Image (cartoon, rainbow, N blue to C red):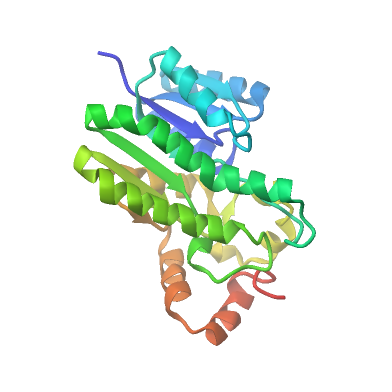
Amino acid sequence: MRKPYALITGSTSGIGLEIAHNLGKRGFNLILTARRKVLLKTISIKISKKYNVKVDYICGDLSLKETPNKIFEYCDLKKYDINILINNAGYGIVAPLHESSMEDEEKCIRVLSISVIALTKLFLNKMMKKGDGKIMIVSSVAAFAPPSAVQSLYGPTKTFVNRFSELINLNYNKYGIYSTAVCPGYTITNFHTASGVQDEMNRVPKFLKSSAFRVASGSVDAMFKRKHLYVPTKRWKIIAFLLKTVPRPIFKILSSIIAPGRFEK
């Protein structure tokens, strides 16, 4: 019997890389995708040897329209049975909305939301035929927060993918397909440096930061438990609740502590 595969986007660093290790340790074969081919190859070999699982990779930029189809067609050609889909790829824009190019904004929306829809739609039919499928969408607590002065489109796209995850559960749980929206708080990865907000991250209190390993471990557990929504750590569960409930004036005071600079004009 052919073993199922887990497909992970944004798998060469941070949460995606830790999820790859977690699933490899559990005995799952893996398909890793990201933009850096040499790093993808190196990581694939390392994980395969460490956990004695099959690991393949496909290099692709999810800001390009054709990439989701390219990934699906590759998996179809290789006859990989994709049982788990991890939508984790990230994208950040440093410049404020009035200074950033429309091209950059479109790339951001494509990576953070359109590619999530596209990959889910592409693999959904095969999951339905098997009556089994697990989807994880790595979102953020920013989905619950008011609009941000930093990375203006980041929060709105995360709100959108949370609702998209709800849509999957509403319509496809009856087919054995479950989606988990993972909403971490500040996580220690290289994303903040790459997206130009490392200074902001440096001002966040240490007790509010989580390791990518911790976030990934809890997220994979939540996915296998078929949780629809998962916020890693008790602290961020409380903060997520407050983000959805407290009045704006109180939120402004809290945000100056938990997210200095993010919600300041």
The one nearer the camera, 77 or 2, is 77
Q: Is residue 206 visible?
A: yes
Above or below for 244 versus 118: below
Q: Which residue does the image show at 69% across and 75% down from the upper left? A: 264
Residue farthest bottom in this picture: 249
Q: Which residue does the image show at 34% across and 51% down from the upper left? A: 167
Q: Is residue 9 left or right of residue 164?
A: right
Q: Is residue 98 left or right of residue 240?
A: right
| Quadrant in which the N terminus appears | top left
Residue 151 image position (x, y, % from top left): 67, 59
The one nearer the camera, 57 or 47, is 57
Above or below for 262 versus 253: above
Q: Is residue 222 visible?
A: no
Q: How many marks?
A: 0
Answer with the quarter of the image where residue 60 lies: top right
| Quadrant in which the C terminus appears | bottom right
Residue farthest right in this picture: 99
Q: Which residue does the image show at 31% across and 19% down from the upper left? A: 3
Answer with the quarter of the image where residue 43 lies: top right
Residue 38 image position (x, y, % from top left): 67, 21
Q: Which residue does the image show at 50% across and 38% down from the upper left? A: 18
Residue 142 image position (x, y, % from top left): 53, 62
Answer with the quarter of the image where residue 78 lies: top left
